[in-house]
Image: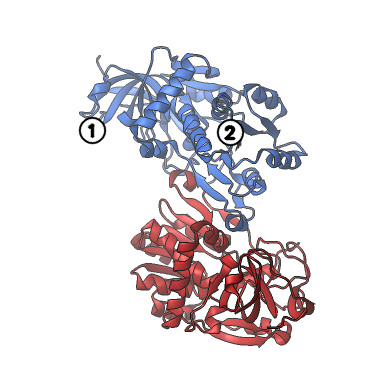
Chain colours: A red, B blue
Amino acid sequence: MTIPSTMKALLLQNDGYAKVPSGTVLEAMAPYVEEGTIEVPSPKGSEVLIKVALASINPSDVMFIKGMYGQPRALGRPAGFEGVGEVVAAGPDAEGLIGKRIAFATGLTNWGSWAEYAVAEAAACIPLLDTVRDEDAAAMIVNPLTAIAMFGLVKDEGEKAFILTAGASQLCKLIIGVAKDEGYRPIAIVRRDDQIALLEGMGAAHVLNAEAPDFKQKLAEVLKVEKPRILLDAVTGPLAGAIFSAMGKRARWIVYGRLDAVQTVIPEPGQMIFMHKKIEGFWLTEWMRSVGPERRAAAAIEAQKRFSDGRWATDVTAIVPLEEAVLRVSEELAKPNGKVFIKP
Amino acid sequence: MTIPSTMKALLLQNDGYAKVPSGTVLEAMAPYVEEGTIEVPSPKGSEVLIKVALASINPSDVMFIKGMYGQPRALGRPAGFEGVGEVVAAGPDAEGLIGKRIAFATGLTNWGSWAEYAVAEAAACIPLLDTVRDEDAAAMIVNPLTAIAMFGLVKDEGEKAFILTAGASQLCKLIIGVAKDEGYRPIAIVRRDDQIALLEGMGAAHVLNAEAPDFKQKLAEVLKVEKPRILLDAVTGPLAGAIFSAMGKRARWIVYGRLDAVQTVIPEPGQMIFMHKKIEGFWLTEWMRSVGPERRAAAAIEAQKRFSDGRWATDVTAIVPLEEAVLRVSEELAKPNGKVFIKP
């Protein structure tokens, strides 16, 4: 395959972090990324070059391009944390992947997937079964592997019940599905009543609307009965603080996302002392680095099986051609309950 | 020994927690404790009855009687978390302690030491060497054992440098002494310049005044060189949050006290995710329960040796007779750098 010298990509328009925090909604792509043409990069060492078939847009991408994800931006580089495609070139330590169809994540290379070609570390590539659709493969790592890895934390802790904020996110839907299959009891926190029946149907033991006037009382009732120890939290801010504060002894607040720009207060620091509560974080990149290739491969196989046999399926809101992305993406993202993809 | 049926004690005047938080200074004893006469309690099970020789006043006592310690008060009960005295009666499972001079803590019984007689669990009693003074023994558990236990966390973590807030407290002085002897590098955070030379003399590698205009810059310089992972924090609030935020990867914020009534914010929750930082708590009662009798006994021996040979010594501000305590204690506590005791 002939690799061109330049390519189209959606390029970051800022360096570093946002000076002023903004909301989690992407009002428009234009201030953060613009379409442009840059050189196709050359893979080195254990990197591979991928011809991107489809790239996904996750909430973490939105936070990242806005400068609020806790990782610095690099002006002029392509955005996009994951995608699917074919390996067309490789550094000397990753040649075995050439010609393979893979899902990939770009967290280790800082060279994004919203482009005709992307660069990824071999350790962040998953060779795919033919039975996995592009739409599932393009969103295979950031959400599905995180779901399997974080559900592993719940299993290690031992309590059947656990709490999820942003309960209607794609990620939480995946976790709820796995948890239900293994007899666990997810407690999903949402912001709209119309998400309640949907998530209960998927296997959530309880779904609570944080905007409801009786939320705190209902939460207290559920906590009393279910005694969850783990809070898997994608929102931080006052909601997460209030849930953590209401939880019982030995509660663990595991932060994996930051959707609330409001400051995060520890409501009762004394609980850290007298109730042995803990606050920690989860980052898939660190998990993949720390668990080793076997557990990583097992999670990748588990995810592919679930997508292949239909237990998991990615809801697709839209597949937007790269050249239309700057204009259309924010509008597509505003539609609920599905995922938006970019097709180079 | 004949045990009387009633005794004098300093009795809690409130139930539960403070409705409105107040400062850490004890403006007066009277609104929180009053002298009174109550029945001498009967020890049950593994409890002992102690004729109190001397009881100490710790910052945690002040926070407790004010209702801000995270443990509920019981109206009409004696206050006081620790003391020294002779065991004069015991429940059937603790008779071996009768006649012994012991240091004791009351966290498990909720029946305080600021009284002629106190009740303690056998597991919270330390039989004393004759070489340990009453002034050291009365303040042997809450501070010295905490010092040894928390320094153990530092040793387990492996980094030589660590940070202490409230660096001029009795507790921190004890930790600094042990750490120096074992070649560790304490970084003490204080609020007054006159504490700097004192703590450097005791073995602190760095002493930083949090009130100095260049504090943040000096802190950054020290963190860059020393790379501490552990923050032993007795203050919470904005100061502790700022230190934690400035620390590097894998920092652990270990809260063991709460001296700042201002709310505690996690300045950058994204650091929990991308820098693997953690927030946890330390409570001696939980430590004693969880480490088992051997490690507990080793810590008790270590503390007594240090007091016996003079490596540790409790600075005494005043020994106040119980009947003068309500009037005099707040004034004595206002004097810096020493401990105040109550003598029944």
In the rendered image, which residue does mark 1 sit on? B45
Element carrying mark 1: loop
Task: Classify 10 Å Cα crowding around label 1: few (below 14), some (14-19), many (20 and above).
Answer: few
* Left or right relative to A193: residue A92: right
- Circle 2 chain: B
Mark 1 to mark 2 CA distance (whole Å): 37 Å
Element carrying mark 2: loop
- Circle 1 chain: B
* Left or right relative to B222: residue B270: left
Q: Residue A226, how many percent across, how many down?
A: 35, 62
**Residue visible at 55% across and 32% down?**
B26
The kind of residue on which mark 2 rests is: Val
The kind of residue on which mark 1 rests is: Gly
* Left or right relative to B116: residue A46: right
In the rendered image, which residue does mark 2 sit on? B25
**Residue visible at 29% across and 25% down?**
B49
Residue A43 or residue B274, whichever sits in front: A43
> In which quadrant will I find the C terminus of chain A?
bottom right
Write down the quadrant of residue A83 in the picture: bottom right
Residue B334 or residue A186, whichever sits in front: A186
Q: Is residue B275 above or below residue A67?
A: above
**Residue visible at 64% across and 53% down?**
B267
Q: Residue B235, how many percent across, how many down?
A: 58, 40
Residue A52 or residue B82, whichever sits in front: A52
- Residue B114 visible to the viewer: no
Q: Residue B341, how many percent across, how many down?
A: 48, 21
Task: Classify 10 Å Cα crowding around label 2: few (below 14), some (14-19), many (20 and above).
Answer: some
Q: Give the mark toward the camera: 1 or 2.
A: 1
Count of numbered badges drawn on the protein: 2
